[in-house]
Amino acid sequence: MSVDVVEAGRTQWSLTRASNIKPVRRYKTRPDVVETERLYDAKEVLVLLGGISARTLWGLTNAGKIKCVRIGRLIRYAASDVNRFIESSRSS
């Protein structure tokens, strides 16, 4: 049985039979690794904000005053968003 490899852009297609066509991914270089900033869970944000209640945090989140990141069922807060909220809440 001969196997032919046909190139189409970045994806190569391996043809073993006419009915069995499957993609073969080949990357010349590894994709760049993206560094992300620190994500806090709700308990950590409560401590960072001086011990506010969980209900207050959810209210601020629902009002859009603190942005959150949803990963499936998990809710996380980016460090930059928490710092931005703290800076905007300071009285002059």
Image (cartoon, grey):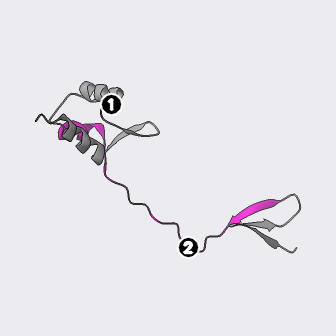
| Residue density around tag 2, few if under 14, some if 14–19, many if 20 or more, within 10 Å | few
Which of the 4 image quadrants contains residue 46?
top left
- Front-most of 62 and 84? 84
Q: Which numbered dot is residue 79?
A: none
- Front-most of 41 and 29? 29
Which of the 4 image quadrants contains residue 1?
bottom right
In the visual, does 67 lie left or right of 13? left
Which of the 4 image quadrants contains residue 7?
bottom right
Q: Which numbered dot is residue 61?
A: 1
Q: What amino acid type should be assigned to the residue bearing mark 1?
A: Thr
The residue furthest front is: 92
- The percent coordinates of residue 44 (x first, y second) are 24, 41
- Front-most of 58 and 91? 91
- The percent coordinates of residue 76 (x first, y second) are 35, 41
The residue furthest left is: 92
Q: Residue at x 81, y 60 (%)?
A: 21
- The residue tagged 2 is 29
Q: What amino acid type should be assigned to the residue bearing mark 2?
A: Thr
As for residue 71 lying within the magenta part, the answer is no
The part of the chain drawn in magenta is 20-49
Distance from the alpha carbon under mark 1 to that under mark 2? 40 Å
Q: Residue at x 78, y 67 (%)?
A: 14
- The percent coordinates of residue 90 (x first, y second) are 15, 36
